[in-house]
Amino acid sequence: NDSSETKLEHTIKNIRVEYSNPYKDGFFGDLLIERIIKIDANLILSDKSGIKTYDMNDSYKDTVEVESIGRIENPAIPFTQSAIPELPFFSNLLEPIIVVGTLIVTIILFFTVRSK
């Protein structure tokens, strides 16, 4: 073993995915959710001058479509999976109510105006 070579060793203590804040992208848009990926690791750098140890705590945040979570998560890799918070019931119900209500009002107005 040559003592002049530089080595980097790492130990991953924890990797996890968290989902939060589901929301609609616009009125008739897709249902989106924030995804946060967190990693905790130890890095050990050794070279001829000695050994240095670093703690790495990092996170990455993005937004994904709720319907694509099944394709993103891999059942063979457990840390890619996480509980999905409850989706907003009101926003999912509001759009069909508005569409049906608008359709009913349009039909009523069409026949009311036409009969006069």
Image (cartoon, grey):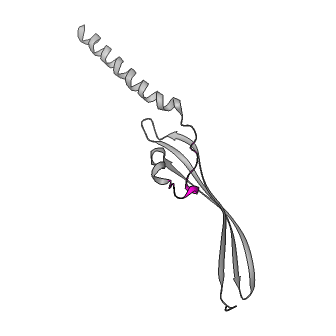
Query: Is residue 89 one of those drawn in magenta?
Result: no
The magenta segment is: 73-84
Query: Is residue 83 one of those drawn in magenta?
Result: yes
Quadrant where the N terminus sits is bottom right
Give whichever of 26, 78 is nearer the camera.
78
Quadrant where the C terminus sits is top left
Q: Residue at x 52, y 31 (%)?
A: 89
Give whichever of 95, 13 is nearer the camera.
13
Q: Residue at x 52, y 29 (%)?
A: 90
Q: Residue at x 65, y 82 (%)?
A: 7
- The image shows residue 67 at horizontal and vertical percentages of 45, 45
Q: Residue at x 58, y 41 (%)?
A: 85
Q: How many numbered badges does the structure rendering display?
A: 0
Q: Is residue 1 above or below residue 34?
A: below
Q: Is residue 97 above or below residue 111?
A: below
Q: Is residue 95 above or below residue 80?
A: above
99 displayed left or right of 110: right
- The image shows residue 80 at horizontal and vertical percentages of 55, 55
Find the residue positioned furthest to the front. 76
- The image shows residue 17 at horizontal and vertical percentages of 59, 53
Magenta portion: prevailing SS class:
loop
- The image shows residue 50 at horizontal and vertical percentages of 75, 84
Find the residue positioned furthest to the top. 116
